[in-house]
Amino acid sequence: MSGGQLPWEGPFRVDSDKDTYRCQLQDSPGIYRIRAFTSPRDPIIIARCNGRDPDGILHIGETKCLRTRLRHFRDAAIGNGNSHAAGCEFRDYGFASQFPKESL
């Protein structure tokens, strides 16, 4: 670790299937970021009120179970129920028109 930053793991696609969630995500506590990408490694630069976000971060959260929390975000974002607040905001505010779920 340098500069006080956490070592983040590589991207995991939000629109992955259930088997991928089961195999690749831990069933343990953790911190996660929901980010938007133009390609597997290139984040979308997002305009913010105080400048530009070069990392494409839409949401940062913490959870007791990464696997369940990210699945709940995905389900809420695409309208399949669940009550993940950021997923509901993503759906209700129409962010999918700017950031398709395939880019998250």
Image: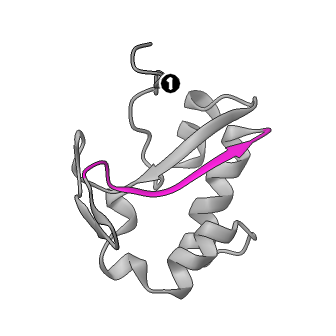
Q: Which residue does the image show at 72% across and 47% down from the upper left?
A: 68
Give the percent coordinates (x, y) of residue 99: 33, 70
Give the percent coordinates (x, y) of residue 41: 23, 39
In the picture, the quarter occupied by the C terminus is bottom left
Q: Which residue does the image show at 76% across and 39% down from the upper left?
A: 65
- The furthest residue to the right: 64
Amino acid identity at mark 1 = Leu
Q: Which residues are magenta?
A: 54-64
Q: Main secondary structure of the magenta part?
A: strand
In the picture, the quarter occupied by the N terminus is top left
Give the percent coordinates (x, y) of residue 30: 68, 33
Relative to 69, residue 67 above or below:
above
Residue 24, image quadrant: top right
Give the percent coordinates (x, y) of residue 45: 22, 59
Relative to 75, residue 17 above or below:
above
Where does label 1 land, which residue?
6
Residue 59 is one of the magenta-drawn residues: yes
Q: How many marks?
A: 1
Instruction: Note whether residue 16 is visible.
Output: no
Relative to 7, residue 86 above or below:
below
Nearer to the camera, 34 or 20: 34
90 sits left or right of 70 in the view = left
Mark 1 Cα shell of 10 Å, populated few (<14), some (14-19), many (≥20): few
Residue 87 is one of the magenta-drawn residues: no
Q: Which residue does the image show at 68% across and 39% down from the upper left?
A: 66
103 sits left or right of 23 in the view = left
